[in-house]
């Protein structure tokens, strides 16, 4: 296989949809020789924040001198973003060879989904690359997610809110139960900012499995109003004057979960110095999340796609507005058909002056016209522009050089924006 044919093959597996369960993954791991058992791991679940927490954790570990695998999903622009070793994406040759290897092992009797296949590919690549630690982000839920074949040094559940209810349930308790599925017997778990209903479920599962729990604002905490100059406190770590390269006050919570997770791993012999903590936080990169990619007007990309993430985005816009008045604010919005459109825009509706409705190039994406029907009367000045290129051009015009263009509603939309900017050579966002 070439890289292009391998990726095309993998994408065709998406037609099988999502199949929650571990039987296929366990058999696939056995046929590969249990690659996930050849290194230590940290496992991170959550509705929002799990990707940022994983990126911070990996950055600190790498700064401490460890060889680190990082597995995240989805990718923004290129498939290879999902699988990294010390920050470097898996190369095209390895993708092709691993696709062939796993295909041969599956034979006629094993039919993994796209996510099972790519998870197996990541685990094998980490083993082949001799990583010391793998930082693994859960794909969906936790209990039946393909990544849940690992037994980590420690786990984390960053946040729990409403998303993917068709798979995880319609209450915070049911969603929390699915995410608590990553908690293993005797393995410590770090818990971020949770509603009481979700916390009670997580706590009950942890007690049943005799897993010690470290909870944000009880066992560890941060203090500070900006991503620069904040402090962190726990029983075994105390740092002042920390600076996180990721934008947004919510990143304090993600940094806190990452540091608490690393604190839990210390008992397993994976330790980090204060210098590594500071270096990792200051250098971490996590694209497509409150990412400013242009000026005059300011262009902000954010992959928020559920109401809780929209609340974080709204808070960031408010804080930014207090620091430097950016008017008008133009929202470029594209979402999947199955998302809570009205719930998503509720935190944003009083902050935006104009809205350009567009659509990602995916079958499950809501059309710009469908979004207009869903949001009519809830947002001001709706413009329907299905073409992303035209949507961005209109948004820039509406924003004027002094305004803000915010592209949001879907990581897929943000990824398409980034791909388009790259394809244009000199970014059109900079004129």
Image (cartoon, rainbow, N blue to C red):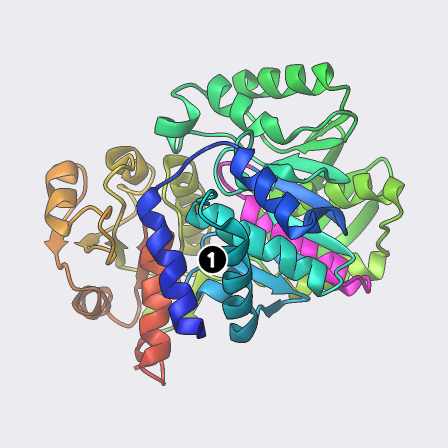
Residue 225 visible at all: no
Tell me if residue 168 comes above or below residue 251 in the rendering: above
In terms of depth relative to the viewer, which is nearer, 385 or 22? Answer: 22
Whether residue 67 appears in magenta in the rendering, the answer is yes
Residue at position x 69%, y 51% from top?
35
Instruction: Please give left or right for residue 423 compared with residue 79 in the image.
Output: left
Q: To which residue does mark 1 refer?
A: 323
Number of residue marks: 1
Instruction: Please give left or right for residue 62 compared with residue 20 in the image.
Output: right
Tell me if residue 130 comes above or below residue 213 in the rendering: below
Q: Quadrant of residue 310?
A: top left
Residue 341 visible at all: yes
Q: Position of residue 291 (x, y in %)?
A: 45, 62
Whether residue 199 appears in magenta in the rendering, the answer is no
Tell me if residue 102 comes above or below residue 423 in the rendering: above
For the stretch drawn in magenta, the main secondary structure is helix
Label 1, secondary structure: give it.
Answer: helix
Q: Find the residue positioned furthest to the bottom.
A: 426
Q: Position of residue 105 (x, y in %)?
A: 55, 53
Residue at position x 46%, y 42% from top?
109
Instruction: Please give left or right for residue 188 compared with residue 98 in the image.
Output: right
Residue stretch rendered in magenta on the structure: 46-68
Q: Quadrant of the C terminus?
A: bottom left
Q: Quadrant of residue 67?
A: bottom right
Residue at position x 88%, y 40% from top?
267
Q: Position of residue 118 (x, y in %)?
A: 51, 54
In terms of depth relative to the viewer, which is nearer, 42 or 96? Answer: 96
Residue at position x 16%, y 44% from top?
371
Instruction: Please give left or right for residue 316 compared with residue 259 in the image.
Output: left
Q: Within 10 Å of the Cα at label 1, are there few (<14), some (14-19), or many (20+) other Cα atoms?
A: few
């Amino acid at each position: 296989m070439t890289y292009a044919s391998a990726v095309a093959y993998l994408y065709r597996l998406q037609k099988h949809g999502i199949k929650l369960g571990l039987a296929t993954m366990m058999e696939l791991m056995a046929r590969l020789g249990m690659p996930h058992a050849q290194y230590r791991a940290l496992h991170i679940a959550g509705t929002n924040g799990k990707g940022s927490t994983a990126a911070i954790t990996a950055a600190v570990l790498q700064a401490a001198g460890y060889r680190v695998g990082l597995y995240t999903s989805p990718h923004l622009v290129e498939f290879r973003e999902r699988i990294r070793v010390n920050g470097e994406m898996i190369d095209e040759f390895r993708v092709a060879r691993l696709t062939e290897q796993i295909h041969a092992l599956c034979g006629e009797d094993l039919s993994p989904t796209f996510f099972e296949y790519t998870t197996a590919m990541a685990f094998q690549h980490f083993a082949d690359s001799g990583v010391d630690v793998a930082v693994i982000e859960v794909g969906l839920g936790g209990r039946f997610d393909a990544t849940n074949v690992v037994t980590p040094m420690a786990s984390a559940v960053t946040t729990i809110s409403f998303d993917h209810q068709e798979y995880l349930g319609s209450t915070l308790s049911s969603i929390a139960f699915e995410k608590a599925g990553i908690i293993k017997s005797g393995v410590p778990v770090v818990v971020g900012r949770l509603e009481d209903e979700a916390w009670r479920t997580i706590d009950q599962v942890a007690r049943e499995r005799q897993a010690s729990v470290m909870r944000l604002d009880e066992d560890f905490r941060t203090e500070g109003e900006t991503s620069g100059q904040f402090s962190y406190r726990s029983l075994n770590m105390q740092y002042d004057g920390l600076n996180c390269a990721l934008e947004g006050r919510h990143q304090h919570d993600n940094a806190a979960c990452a540091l608490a997770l690393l604190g839990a791993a210390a008992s397993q012999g994976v330790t980090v110095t204060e210098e590594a903590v500071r270096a990792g936080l200051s250098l971490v990169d996590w694209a497509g999340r409150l990412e400013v990619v242009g000026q005059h007007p300011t262009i902000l990309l954010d992959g928020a796609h559920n109401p809780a993430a929209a609340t974080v985005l709204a808070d960031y816009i408010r804080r930014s507005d207090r620091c430097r008045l950016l008017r008008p604010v133009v929202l470029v919005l594209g979402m999947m058909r199955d998302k809570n459109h009205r719930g998503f825009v509720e935190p944003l509706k009083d902050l935006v002056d104009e809205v350009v409705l567009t659509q990602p190039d995916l079958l499950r994406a809501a059309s710009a016209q469908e979004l207009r029907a869903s949001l009519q009367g809830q947002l001001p000045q709706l413009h329907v522009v299905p073409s992303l290129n035209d949507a961005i051009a209109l948004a820039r015009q509406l924003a004027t050089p002094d305004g803000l263009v915010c592209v949001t509603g879907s990581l897929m939309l943000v990824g398409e924006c980034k791909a388009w900017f790259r394809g244009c050579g000199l970014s059109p966002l900079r004129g």
